[in-house]
Every structure is written in structure tokens, then in C-alpha cells.
Amino acid sequence: MSTPLFVLADALLLQGGYNAALVAIGAGLLGIAAGAGGTFLFLRKRALVSDAIAHATLPGVGLAFLAMVAFGLDGRSLIGLIAGSALSAAAGLFAVEWITRRTRLAEDTAIGAVLSVFFGFGIVLLTVIQTQSQGRQAGLEGFLLGSTAGMLFQDAIVIAVGGVLAIAALIALRRPMTMVAFDPGFAAASGVNTGRVDMAMMMLVLAVTVTGLKIVGLVLIVALLIIPAVAARLWSERTDRVILAAGAIGGVSGYLGAAISAAAPGLPTGPIIVLVSFALFLASLLFAPQRGVLAAAIRHRSFQLRLHRRQGLLSLARSEPIFDPLTLRVLQREGLIRTDRVATEEGRAAAARALRDERRFEIAREIHRDDPLAHRYDGLTPIEDVMTADEIAEIDRMVNRPSSVGAPA
């Protein structure tokens, strides 16, 4: 009997069957497109628009099912349901844009109104559909949270192809969308039609949303659009790197989440993908080199130690007693004082340099009273890194350098 670990390994290595392999590949491609495409929304500060688009797809799913059944077609055809959800989402996006342009309501207010009305209408339609004989086996509730159970081979092909097309559109439009997302004023001055690019950005998000309905679900697709972008932003300040990192995080989330769902069919696909994405966000939040919590804690600790070292050296230079335990530990660890709190030769020399720099900067404040120089020295950075050699030489002509500092009595 295969253990869950072996089943998961098979799913990750695409050995779980054609459908499972295609779903994993499609989810990975979709995650790349969602993560990279969501970055533009995140940088444009329009993340909530994706939520409105996602919730506006639900009426389209219900209406498409009813229309296909009425014409004697298979109401569960994924292509038909995607087409219906795309039309509905486009109507929702148009409604948000129209309300924002033609009224005094803010965009978030318009999004809230459209989101709730469309989603409520969709729930009513799904309830009506479930009362019909054809609707009981439709499985449309899988579009809420995502479900790959019972997905047909052609459905997996549709999702994989949709992911490839979304990535291709993203590559083709990357430069103008980056310009508009980062600085729309500069983009307009450079001749870019910001309105069209904004619309293309929304259409890309719409395409990712409707393609991912079956896998992630309309309730959670917004997480796959935004979480990878937020996680990627923690790793870099450069837009191109953020886009690449967001695509990578989204791709890993989609692929790994779909594989886990295939290994444990009782688990819904969408929530698993979102949880994997959130786990990667948490790892980014903790370990990112510049913006991560751990890096911030290390920087704070380093600043704290440098501050205690400086204060301790100034106390030694002024023959003042030191009582703070951390200051004593820092000075003792660097060999600047002995265990009896008496300064060593190295400690007296370091204290002399610290006091000399303090005196230098007191003079600098007087000389450069209205100059930014007076605000450049924090007391912790070596003064040679702040002032030029000529500035220091001018100051040294006005101050006597202390040759040594005596040990405290």
C-alpha cells in the first residue's frame, strides 16, 4: 500500500496520471501568470480590483450553465463556463470603472458595491440551479473554492493552455505595464497610452481569474494574484526582480498546491494552493534580507550594540562609572575593559578616538550651522565616512586632539 508521502512524491514528479500531471502543470503556469500579473496591480495600488473581478464571475458561471442546458449542451463544459464567467467579470469591471468615472464615489466603494451585488446574484443563480435535475450533478460549487476532483482531460488542457497564453501576454506587455504601474505620469509623458495599458492589465487579470476558477476558485483567486506579489516585494526593490520573484512564488504555490491536492483528494485545491502561497509569504516575511523580520531584528541588535559601545567609550573617556550590564558585556567582549571595569590600553585608545570625534563634531556644528553637514553625523559611523579629509583637517586646526585617556579611578 502506498503511503501518503509516496503518493505526494508521485504527484510532484508527475507520476500520478495524465490528469493530475496536467492539472499540476496548469496550476503552475497559472500561478506564474497570476503572481507576475498581480504584481502590476499591487504596484498600481489596485489590488481590490482583482477581488471585484473574481466575485463578478459567479453570475456568469450560473448563466452560462443555464444557457448551455437550454440549448441541449453539456452545462458542465469548462470552455462555456469560462466564457460566461469572462463576460460577467468584464461587466463587473466595466461597472466599477463607470461608477468611479461618472460619480463621486471612490474606487473602493464602487468595488464593494459591485462585488456584493454580483456575488449575491451568483449565489441566487447557483441555488436555483441546484433545485433542477441537471444542476444536482453540475458541481458548480467547485468554482467557489476550486476543485480538481473529477476534472476531465480536456478541462486540464484548457487550463494549461490558458496559463501559457496568459504568460505570453504578460511577456509581450511587460514593459508598458511596468511603466504605468511604477510611474503613470512618466509613462504618459513617454507616449504610452496609460488608459489602454490599464485596460490591458485588467484584461490580463480577468483572463487569469477565469482560467483559475476551476483550480483555485473565485473566492481565493485574489490571494494567488496578490500574495506572491507581496512576498516578492520583500525580496527586492527593483520592479523586474519583483515580477520574476512573484511569478516564481506563484508558480511554486500552484504546482505544489495542486500536487498536494492530488495526493489527498479529500482536500480542496484552492485553499491548499493559497496556504502554500501564504507559507512562502511567511518565509519571505521572516527571512528576506532587507525587509524581513529576522534581518530587521539583526539590524536593531547591531544598532543597539554599537550604541552601547559608543556610550561606554565616552564614559571611559570622561572617567564616568559604567553600570549598564549590556554596555559592560560589549566592552568586555571586545577587550576594551577588564573584569574589574578598568580600561585596557586598547580601550583607552578607542575611548580617546570616540571623544575626539565628539569634539570634532561639536566644532563642525558651529562651523556648518546652516549646512546639511550638521545633520550627517549619527555618532556611530566613523567621522571619516561622513566628512571629507579637508573638512576634518579644518576642524582639527580648531581642536586639540586628546593623546590618551586615563583609566577611571
Image (tube, rainbow, N blue to C red):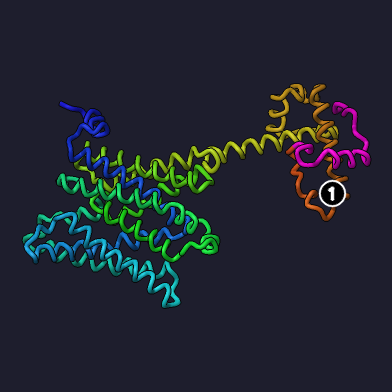
Question: Whole-percent x and y of residue 238?
Answer: 52, 46
Residue 319 image-quadrant placement: top right
Q: How many marks?
A: 1
80 above or below 344?
below
Residue 177: % across, % down = 45, 56
Picture layout, residue 249 above or below residue 53? above
Q: Main secondary structure of the magenta part?
A: loop
Q: Is residue 397 magenta?
A: yes
Q: Going by the image, does 364 lie left or right of 284?
A: right
- Residue at image location 17% in from the left, 45% down from the top: 149
Instruction: Residue 345: name its quadrant.
Output: top right
**Toward the viewer: 276 or 63?**
63
In the rendered image, the quadrant that contains the C terminus is top right
Give how far across and how far down residue 170 sits, in percent. 38, 51
Task: Please indicate, yes or no, whether residue 224 appears anywhere in the rendered image.
Answer: no
- Taking the spot 16% from the left edge, 47% from the top edge, the residue there is 154
Q: Residue at 83% x, 26% y: name it.
A: 348
Read off the magenta span. 382-409
Residue at horizontal 73%, vertical 33%? 309
User: In the displayed structure, would residue 78 be above or below residue 355?
Assistant: below
Quadrant where the N terminus is found in the figure? top left
- Depicted 402 relative to depicted 227: above or below: above
Compared across the picture, whether 142 is left or right of 106 comes to left
Secondary-structure class at tag 1: helix
**Which residue is label 1 attached to?**
365
Magenta stretch encompasses residue 22 = no
Q: Quadrant of residue 346?
A: top right
Q: Amino acid at mark 1?
A: Arg
Question: 168 left or right of 342?
Answer: left
In this view, the residue in front, 306 or 397, is 397
